[in-house]
Image (cartoon, rainbow, N blue to C red):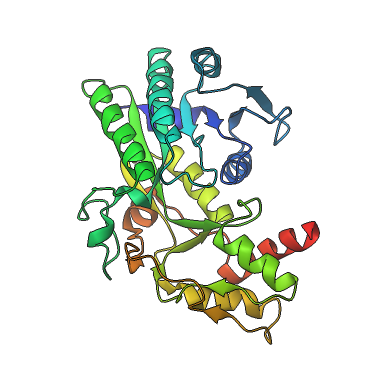
């Protein structure tokens, strides 16, 4: 395949769905740093996020998907999905599975060359996630949530659709636990930050869970790097660092008010919650060539500043 050679000669046109979203804004920023020709696709954003070409399209409608594919991009980064509260078990996951499959099918039919999906660590078998980092090559993909099942089904269906087509590529960034400005207010990091800024004691679970937290700036850069590479298949997007939730939350609290207590154990741990969800980032680092662009402390400080400005 000559796609990589072509990219070295001519900057590709890249279309990004969900461009105005939590991760989408950082992907757009990373692609702007790479100075690529960019088309931002969003359902709600009336104007351009970056000052470049933006179109509005409802991807749950066939007309919207056809319009989104009319831009004739070479690469599609598909981030759009329903991640509103309750998304883990929402019926909308099946709607987005169907719409996303049709979107990619149309994109390839119109000459698109590469698709990068926004996958999730929830595609892995949570009951197998003990203490070993999850590996794209060695860890089983047996999702236990409706969200993870839909994301995995989309990737598998598109892999079958791609079979026999030597001129198209497919990859999927499996996102672990991102945080940063613009995250939904009910999520862990905004909840802790807003409570601490208000001088309130955050109520938490035991905090013993080991998780892989990655800032949204670095997540955006990882998707841009993956899109501009020749790497195919699933690629973990995480920090590769195992960190107890209680330690991560304590770091956030200490950068706001070190004297404020944290109430661990106020909320019971879920019985089905895996003790460890950490990424093996070998593919991301060694094959894609990605490097973290911001330290965790700087990312936390910038996230705190975002919520402080809104308080």
Q: Residue at x 35, y 42 (%)?
A: 146
Q: Position of residue 175 (x, y in %)?
A: 43, 50
In the picture, residue 103 is in which quadrant? top left
Q: Position of residue 246 (x, y in %)?
A: 49, 77
Give the left or right position of residue 117, taking residue 42 as reference. Answer: left
Asked whether the viewer can see residue 41, the reply is: yes
Q: Position of residue 260 (x, y in %)?
A: 67, 83
Asked whether the viewer can see residue 230, the reply is: no
Disc count in the image?
Answer: 0
Viewer-side residue, 173 vs 63? 63
Q: Residue at x 42, y 46 (%)?
A: 88
Q: Is residue 45 above or below residue 247?
A: above
Give the left or right position of residue 263, taking residue 155 as reference. Answer: right
- Residue furthest to the bottom in view is 259
Q: Position of residue 65 (x, y in %)?
A: 50, 18
Give the left or right position of residue 207, taking residue 250 as reference. Answer: left
Viewer-side residue, 86 vs 83? 86
Q: Residue at x 36, y 58 (%)?
A: 281
Viewer-side residue, 215 vs 227? 215
In the picture, residue 52 is in which quadrant? top right
- Quarter of the picture containing the C terminus is bottom right
Q: Residue at x 31, y 41 (%)?
A: 149
Viewer-side residue, 143 vs 206? 206
- Quarter of the picture containing the N terminus is top left
């Amino acid at each position: 395949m000559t796609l990589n050679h072509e990219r070295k000669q001519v900057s590709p046109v890249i279309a990004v769905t969900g461009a105005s979203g939590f991760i989408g804004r950082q992907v757009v920023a990373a692609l702007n740093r790479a100075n690529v020709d960019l088309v931002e696709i969003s359902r709600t954003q009336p104007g351009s996020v970056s000052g470049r070409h933006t179109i509005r399209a409802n991807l749950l409608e066939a007309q919207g998907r056809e319009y989104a594919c009319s831009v004739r991009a070479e690469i599609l980064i598909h981030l759009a999905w329903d991640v509103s509260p309750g998304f883990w078990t929402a019926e909308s996951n099946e709607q987005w599975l169907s719409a996303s499959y049709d979107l990619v099918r149309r994109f390839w039919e119109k000459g698109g060359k590469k698709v990068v999906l926004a996958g999730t660590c929830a595609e892995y078998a949570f009951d197998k996630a003990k203490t070993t980092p999850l590996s794209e090559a060695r860890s089983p993909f047996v999702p236990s949530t409706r969200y993870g099942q839909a994301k995995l089904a989309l990737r598998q269906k598109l892999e079958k659709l791609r079979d026999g087509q030597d001129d198209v590529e497919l990859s999927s960034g499996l996102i672990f636990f991102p945080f940063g400005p613009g995250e939904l207010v009910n999520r862990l990091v905004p909840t802790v930050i807003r409570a601490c800024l208000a001088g309130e004691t955050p109520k938490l679970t035991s905090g013993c869970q080991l998780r892989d937290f990655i800032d949204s700036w670095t997540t955006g850069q990882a998707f841009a790097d993956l899109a501009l590479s020749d790497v195919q298949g699933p690629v973990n997007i995480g920090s590769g660092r195992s960190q107890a939730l209680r330690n991560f939350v304590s770091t956030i609290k200490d950068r706001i008010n070190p004297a404020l207590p944290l109430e661990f154990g106020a909320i019971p741990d879920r019985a089905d919650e895996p003790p460890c969800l950490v990424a093996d980032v070998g593919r991301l680092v060694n094959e894609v060539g990605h490097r973290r662009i911001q330290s965790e402390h700087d990312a936390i400080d910038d996230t705190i500043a975002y919520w402080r400005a809104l308080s």
